[in-house]
Amino acid sequence: MWINPSQPLDVDESRALARLFTTLTVKSIVRTHSSTAGAQKPESLARPLSKHVAYVIQAYVEALNDPLCVVPLNVRRELQPGLFALCDMLHEHGRDALMTSALDAGGKAVMKALWRDYEKQRYVGKG
């Protein structure tokens, strides 16, 4: 596990985790020491990570849905930008698969609320 239950995330750590999730969507060039470095094109890690995003979101939803796990409001607020970046990588097909196969009724309600908040802030490109 990458988060220790006996030492929950505080606000600064949740902000750093959200920043990590959003940084993974930014295109960058991997720095190498070879002579072909000029031929590289910028790519983001969103595509390789998209296979694992559903599991990260599922873990978050299950943590919120667990009655013995308390995630303070300020931690949830700091995690939101990163979760929205993960939702962007998940797309609707992945969301539907997650909802039908991995979540119970409470998890589905949490996931719907997360997706509704994601849809509110998402840029759709209409002028």
Image: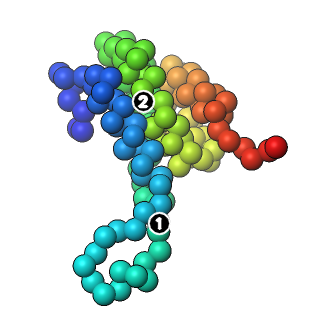
Res 79 label: 2
Q: Secondary structure at mark 2?
A: helix
Instruction: Give the quadrant of the C terminus.
Output: top right
Q: Is residue 102 visible?
A: no
Q: Amino acid at mark 2?
A: Leu
What residue lies at 36% left-to-right and 17% top-to-bottom?
71
Q: Is 29 drawn above or below residue 22 in the view shown?
A: below
Q: Tell which residue pokes out farthest to the bottom in this image.
A: 35
Q: 63 and 16: which one is in front?
A: 16
Q: Mark 1 or mark 2: which comes first in sequence?
A: 1
Residue 114 visible to an observer of this rendering: yes
Q: Give the residue type that dot 1 points to.
A: Glu
Picture quadrant where residue 82 is located: top left
Horizontal and vertical percent position of residue 99: 56, 35
Residue 62 shown left or right of residue 89 in the figure: left
Q: Position of residue 95 (x, y in %)?
A: 57, 41
Real-space Cα separation, disc 1 to disc 2, in angstroms: 24 Å
Way the structure is coloured: rainbow
Please tell me how crowded label 1 is: few (under 14), some (14-19), or many (20+) other residues with Cα within 10 Å: some
Q: Position of residue 23 (x, y in %)?
A: 42, 49
The residue under the point 68% across, 41% down is: 123
Residues marked 1 and 2 touching at CB (< 8 Å): no
* 43 relative to 126, above or below: below
The residue at the point 65 percent across, 38 percent down is 122
The image's mark for residue 43 is 1
Q: Nearer the viewer, residue 55 or 4?
A: 4
Label 1 sits on a secondary structure element that is loop
Q: Is residue 92 above or below residue 6?
A: below
Furthest residue in direction left, as rendered: 6
